[in-house]
Amino acid sequence: MAGKVRVGFYSLTGCAGDLLSILNIEDRLLEIFEKVELVEFVMASSNVKPGGVDIAFVEGSVTTEKDLKALKEIRAKCDRLVALGDCAVWGGVQASLTGLDPRELMKSVYGTEQNLYGFLGEHKPLSEVVKVDLELPGCPIEQEEFIKAFVSLLRGDLPEVKDYPVCIECKIREVPCLVVEKGEACLGPITVGGCKARCPYHGVPCIGCRGPIKDEANVAGELLMLMEKGWKPLDAINRMKLFAARYKDLAKLVGRG
């Protein structure tokens, strides 16, 4: 690429926690951004430059007609698109409500069945709408993982994606299994690693905030294991739905596949 790499950060429907996590890399942020031409990052600056970008980082789910239009426009003007965080990768916590009548939702919150915000009726990850070149999971993302991916992208490479569960990181840190020893509904076996097993290390069961391991998570096996530990099927499924409602195998379990 001639000159500095043009980079943009964009937000759809979400809490913007992933973008805030990037801004919180205070000790390294200027060093990172001085290597690029920052075209758009509204949370950091109101200065938006015209034209396309080499790399687009997009957080949030595709929830409204505005989201849908914006995402397609971003995809059309970028070379590489990165889904940033759980909402962009899996639809986010809001996707766990997919299937509810949007008119009833509008009525319960705003007192009208009119679709005030162009709600699409569901919360989609970016990959269900456009081609995505890289996905960085997490709620929010891991800062170190973002930095490594950012550097790789600036070099013209795509970083290796993690394909192992949180359980591996529990083993590395010698964390006793919360499922086996305490009967906790820990989702470590189906959740993609990268967090260094932060929650289990502190005795808190994994709730799956990094989403399932792509194309490999054995959700049926996880459900069976939790049922054997005394969990009711509906409670176990709802636990898994929190961050992975649109995962194909989980969707089958809840009757949406």
Image (tube, rainbow, N blue to C red):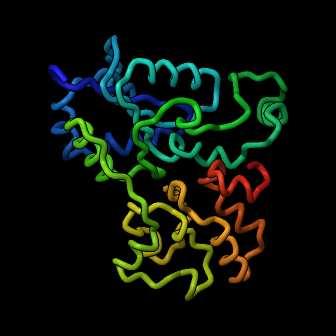
Spot the residue most to the front. 215
Residue toward you, 20 or 94: 94
Residue drawn at 55 percent across, 88 percent down: 181
In the image, residue 251 sits, relative to residue 200, either above or below, namely above
In the image, residue 38 sits, relative to residue 211, either above or below, namely above
Residue drawn at 58 percent across, 86 percent down: 182
Picture coordinates of residue 252, whole percent (x, y) = 73, 55
Q: Quadrant of residue 153?
A: top left
Picture coordinates of residue 85, whole percent (x, y) = 46, 45
Residue drawn at 30 percent across, 47 percent down: 159
Picture coordinates of residue 101, whole percent (x, y) = 82, 37
Q: Quadrant of residue 134?
A: top left
Picture coordinates of residue 209, whole percent (x, y) = 52, 57
99 with respect to 93 (left or right): right
In the image, residue 242 sits, relative to residue 110, either above or below, namely below
Residue drawn at 19 percent across, 44 percent down: 28
Residue toward you, 54 or 15: 54
For the N terminus, the quadrant is top left
Q: Quadrant of residue 32?
A: top left
Spot the residue most to the bottom. 181
